[in-house]
Image: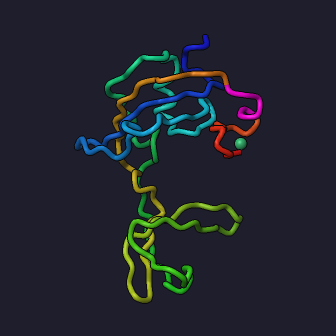
Amino acid sequence: MNNEVQNNMVVSLDYTARLKDGQSIDSSIGKTPLRYLHGYQNIIPGLEEALTGMKVGESHPNIIVPPEKAYGARAEATEWLPRNIFPSDGEIQPGMTFAADDESGETYPMFIKEVKPDSVLVDYNHPLAGETLFFEVTVVDVRPATPEELAHGHVHNGDGQL
Ligand code: ZN
């Protein structure tokens, strides 16, 4: 099926994501649709699952994605770190994200919560951890991925992104 969302297809999607209270946290409306390669975990698992089998032009008014299929449960994962381990050039502000490395060299994000002159409170939870997300979606287009896109596991937009 060439007009249906399936693995190895590039999907163009109009979407609005909301929190439980209805607050919009992200939307493609008024911008270009999101394009992603289906089946490669380029979007959160719960949304990818719900989109599977949808056809071009089809809409869904409210896909409900629980935390475990979105950004995970919220854990006790904050700590104060010395200010001097952060880059000294430029300001550090709540809401910023930095990359941290663990002992095995794996990189993971940490989110800045609070900044004091000598220390910084970081949270290793994704800002949307613990949140159930609500998506309004329309499948705008579906096309087979190119061999190069399949090899890379992501979409090439023709804008130099490789
Ligand atoms: Zn690539």
Image check: 122 left or right of 8?
A: left
Image height of 113 relative to 44, above or below: below
Q: Position of residue 42 (x, y in %)?
A: 58, 39
Q: Is residue 147 magenta?
A: yes
Q: Is residue 38 above or below residue 76?
A: above
* Residue 149 spot, x, y in % from top left: 71, 34
Residue range of the region highlighted in magenta in the rendering:
145-150
Is 52 included in the stretch rendered in magenta? Answer: no
Q: Main secondary structure of the magenta part?
A: helix
The image shows residue 77 at horizontal and vertical percentages of: 45, 65
142 or 42, nearer to the observer: 142
Q: What residue is at 67 percent from the left and 61 percent from the top?
A: 106
Displayed quadrant of residue 67: top left
Q: Which quarter is ligand 1 in? A: top right
| Residue occupying the point 24% across, 41% down | 22
The residue lying toward the viewer, choosing from 135 and 80, is: 135
Q: Residue at x 46, y 47 (%)?
A: 71
Residue furthest toward the left? 21
39 shown above or below 19: above
